[in-house]
Image (spheres, rainbow, N blue to C red):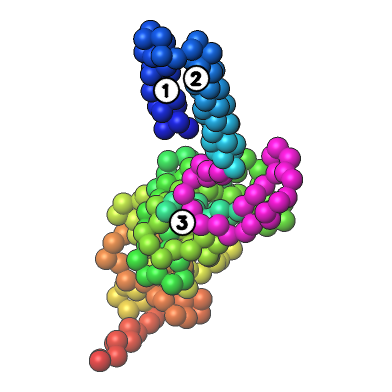
Amino acid sequence: LNALIKNQNGTVKRYRKLLKQRSASQDKLDEAESALMALKARISGARARLKLAEANLKRTKIISPVSGQVEKRFVSVGDYLKKGTPLFELARTDFLEAHLPFPEQLSNYFKIGQAVHLKTTTTLKPIHGTISALHPKINRQSLSMEVIVEVSNPGGWKPGASVNGTVTVETHPNAILIPSRSIVRRPTGNVVYLIKDNKAIEQKITIGIQRDGQSEILSGLSKGQTIALDGAHWLSNGLPVRIKPSAQK
């Protein structure tokens, strides 16, 4: 159309020149100008239709607000959709969320921004994340509280995979730890048996945190003391004992 308009402009100019020279009639000039106006109207209409087509084309493009991979597709070509109809399920792989259930009695120990160490069954090296949200409701079936942790994917971690999380809720520097099997429960409380001068000396203790077969001793013991381990429940205060030497390797 632009080429036709250019040619028709040339025709109008030529008839105007000829009209001045009395070599063409006014009717010929009027016909040429009418044809030019018609061409301009056509190109104006074409541009309007193009603009409308471009706008409609933009409406057919679906742009995701986040990067990821399509896991599920809920619609097909030709489907009529209502506002709010889900189209796809996306799995974001560069940034992950871990949902960790912890016993409800620990709920007061967690806070947003707290550091968490995450580890999967297929990776040996843990990665670090932070608590982004705390579920406000306790799960009545599992009696657990859900902690949500945000973490950047180090590569190779798959959405939906199982993960173990470790949160340090308290730090007790210079704590005394002993094997839990060395602790004996007596009517008077928890005791251990010190080995001193080849005798078992009953020592009452106060226990702190217990985990993974280890017990924290809050009071009753000092570093460097020797205690009975296996068979401690058979001992009594003042009973003679003999320390068995450790096996040589």
Judge left or right: residue 107 versus residue 248: right
Residue 221 % position (x, y): 36, 60
Q: Residue at x 51, y 76 (%)?
A: 233
Q: Is residue 235 above or below residue 220?
A: below
Residue 50 in sight in this render: yes
Judge left or right: residue 138 versus residue 209: right
Check the picture and name the quadrant holding the C terminus.
bottom left
Q: Nearer the viewer, residue 211 or 154?
A: 154
Residue position marked by numbered label 1 in the rendering: 11
Q: CA distance from mark 1 to mark 2?
A: 7 Å
Residue 134 % position (x, y): 55, 43
Residue 110 in sight in this render: no
Whether the magenta-drawn stretch holds residue 175 is answered as no
Q: Residue at x 62, y 40 (%)?
A: 136
Whether the magenta-drawn stretch holds residue 71 is answered as yes
Label at residue 32: 2
Pick whichever of labels 1 and 2 is earlier in the sequence.
1
Q: Verify CB contact (< 8 Å) between mark 3 and mark 2.
A: no
Local secondary structure at mark 3: loop
Query: Which amino acid type is marked by label 2?
Result: Ala
Mark 3 or mark 2: which is in front?
2
Q: Number of callouts in the render?
A: 3
Pick whichever of labels 3 and 2 is earlier in the sequence.
2
Dot 2: few (<14), some (14–19), or many (≥20) neighbours within 10 Å?
many
Where are the magenta residues, as a range? Answer: 61-88
Q: Residue at x 59, y 50 (%)?
A: 146
Residue position marked by numbered label 3 in the rendering: 93
Q: CA distance from mark 1 to mark 3?
A: 64 Å
Pick whichever of labels 1 and 3 is earlier in the sequence.
1
